[in-house]
Image (cartoon, rainbow, N blue to C red):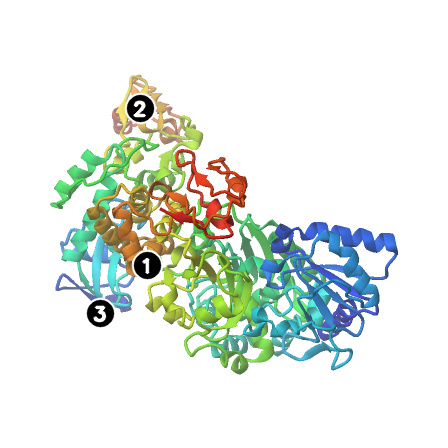
Amino acid sequence: MSAEILERLAVEGRRRLYPFRPRVTVGLATCGRAAGAEEVYRRAESEIAVRGLDVSLVPVGCLGWCAREPLVEVWRPGGPRVTFGRVRPEQVAEILHYTATGELGELRPLGHTRADRDLAGAELWGCGELPGPPAGVAPLDELPFFRSQVRLVMRHCGLIDPEDLAEYVACGGYRALERALREGRPENVIGEVERAGLRGRGGAGFPTGRKWRLVRAAAGEEKYLIVNGDEGDPGAYMDRGLLESNPHLVLEGAILAAFAVGARQGLAYIRAEYPLAVERLGRAVEQAREFGLLGERILGSNFSFDLEVVRGAGAFVCGEETALMAAVEGGPGEPRFRPPYPAERGLWGRPTCINNVETLANVPVILNIGAEAYARLGTPGSRGTKIFSLVGDVVNGGLVEVPMGTTLQEILCGIGGGPSRGTRFKAVQTGGPSGGCLPAELFDLPVDYEGLAEVGTIMGSGGLVALSDRTCMVDLARYFLYFTTAESCGKCTPCREGLHQMLAVLERLREGRAAADELEWLAGAAEMVAAVSLCGLGQTAPNPVLTALRYFGEEVRAHLEGRCPAGVCPALTRFVIDAGSCDGCGRCRVECPVEAIEGAAKEAHAIVQERCLRCGLCREVCPTGAVVVA
Amino acid sequence: MGGNGVRKLTVEIDRRKWSGSPGATVLEAAAELGITIPTLCHHPGLGPYGACRLCLVEVRAGPKTGLAASCTLPVEEGMVVATDTEVVRRARKFVLELLAARPGCREVVARLAAEWGMDFEGRFARNGTASGPAGCVLCGRCVRACARVGAHAIAFAGRGVGRHVTPPFGRPPESCAGCGACAFVCPTGAAALKLTAAGVALPAWQAEVEWVRCAACGAPAGPPAALELPHGRGALCSRCRRRASIEGI
């Protein structure tokens, strides 16, 4: 009976994904919206209505190439599907013309797609060899951005309407759940996830199968499943991307996890700063309940489970599992000592399985392609794929999914396309405020849990911030400490007071007012805070400082002497215009926010030092590189 | 196996053997061996908290080696712990110096350090004023005691260095019973109980609680919540209550 419901949904979903009329999709996840996709969508909507076109216009999630948003895809019956990037509202008319006629005119698509696959990798749709691609349009998956990616978890992000259950089912959704419930052996599900080698994707990397086993074995009838959606690292938005683009994938993973551990109730704790993710997941939960995928006797089985979406309230520390549970219980978000671990005594004192959003999204993938196929990807200690948010001074920023073990070089240069600012990559920051900076010399490092830990950083939740030589490592370490001191709950002494004192030293360093013995203290304090703090926030917050000292010691010491080599710290920087290189174009004068640059057209310009803020904008816009650090 | 079939385990603390039931903490085991470890946030009546990070010890062998807070560290078979090594002393000194830098805390922390025979130099000052009562080291004992007593009149507010203990919205707490449990457990005297003409005051929370007067002698007898008596005798101060029970009134 349950298989029938899914089959009917799949048929309906396939009809919507590949209808008898053209389907135009607009990426409307937060990345798309930030780039102006809402206006593109509205324009398309009104043009379609005005012209009376028979076109299916569908809002979708994030394709992953966020640097090219707004992204619009056009699928004409029979295919291929053509992708347009950086779409402006003025281009909508041309795109709709292409949709109706197949004529590209002046349009330059990013690429085209000839086939889609479902969760198990089986072909969902393919247009074979015919018709050929529009002239000069490369296959999307051969572009440098996509070529080395292995998009298993993000496969249907940007393809399906995130608010359409049928489209998810058409892609193979809920098959794994149906099979698992039909077999009725939670042990099998745990075994599959264990054999796949899945490790927690939220940062700690704890083996997921082992955690499930512990919760299953824990004493007590009442157990809970918590989805940790409190993704807080600045620049990391993998979980947001998944929740906004394919919430049912996460939900199916959560239901499978609950089945595996024996939980009857669950909740998804999503940070309040992700309103679209909260809305989409909430809608997915409603739809799941409607179709018997959540609630009593799921899909006609003996297993009952329901889930509630709960919002966070603006605390980074609530990503830490014990602080999260404290917040859910109605108290302030403060961590507890462990042991006891949540698997034994968690929410309301009961065994609780807490899993990260991305971790859960991997579960239906593993059950569909099989543990062996999943485990073939990645490295022996870190199997499968990982989604990274590639941000910062990189050309192709976005959400990229690669097998574990892919090198930083491949991610930053191959996929990322190199630096977008300055003259070269200087470093990459991994793991957010809990991680550290690795210099460009280490970019041939394969990315996996152990490899990154060995060089002093962590994978964390997957944030990768590319840093050009326009970055000052002291300033960056200061930024992260500013973040962690603001987010420290304040319960334990070393984190609350120690980070505060460390920040004070970095502030003085930035102003050229620090003494050498303070730097010595800083190094020792960083080790101490890491060693004696109560929770992961304090234990890892010193990492940016530790790696700055380890890999950029010279640059740090320069600040003791009152120099900022990167030309960032305002008190230690002076910009001057090299008259020999300046061609008098005047761009710097126009861009300067405080009118601190003077010069006549075509004549060498000069900076009025007393007015200059050291913001560096002139250096960014100068076409001849005439603005230099004095 | 110990008596009653309860599993016993053995750990080594400062080269001495302790044997006891699982569920004990290293702090408790050490105390049984007569080894004192300095603590601030710990109180036997309040359950482990693990916030001050003063009770650090070095775990030489065990599930996880390195520094750990002994008040929340469960004993495990075969664990080897050292409570007074160079590493431990440096870590405790680090914690104390940070606490001493809190506005208004230097003297009080120096006094505690002296009591524990710990040496420290007050190397930092922290600018600004701290919210909350002067001399508070945020050990949380008052908050936990108040919750335990059932009044919930004070709690933590704020985040990071802004964290402080306060009644709700910074106003004199309505649910304060004037029991003085907070003052009783405070290690620094930041929370102190003062007797007034009408009852008691806790200046740290701007709390003033009028004590009920003794129905027999008229002296302040105690906070209303503590003096509800089942026999309808009315509130009696402790002296009159003793006399009443002797004389069978």
Residue B205 is tagged as none
* Kind of residue indicated by mark 1: Thr
Q: Quadrant of residue B157?
A: top left
Q: Mark 3: which amino acid?
A: Gly
Q: Nearer the viewer, mark 1 or mark 3?
A: 1
Q: Count how many numbered circles sit on residues in the image.
A: 3
| Quarter of the figure with the N terminus of chain A | bottom right
Numbered label attached to residue B200 = 2
Q: Sort mark 2 into few (<14), some (14-19) or many (20+) by Cα contacts within 10 Å.
A: many
Q: Nearer the viewer, residue A2 or B65?
A: B65
Sequence-wise first label, 2 or 3: 3
To which residue does mark 3 refer? B78
Q: Secondary structure at mark 2?
A: strand
Asked whether the residues under marks 2 and 3 belong to the same chain, the reply is yes
Judge whether residue B28 can be spotted in this image: no
**Mark 2 belongs to which subunit?**
B
Query: Which label was assigned to residue A547?
Result: 1
Q: Is residue B108 visible?
A: yes
Within 10 angstroms of label 3, few (less than 14), some, or many (20 or more) residues? Answer: few
Q: Residues within 10 Å of mark 1 (few under 14, many from 20)?
A: many
Estimate the x, y position of residue B158 in percent, counting from the top left.
Answer: 41, 38
| Closer to the eye: label 2 or 3 | 3
Alpha carbons under labels 1 and 2: distance apart: 54 Å
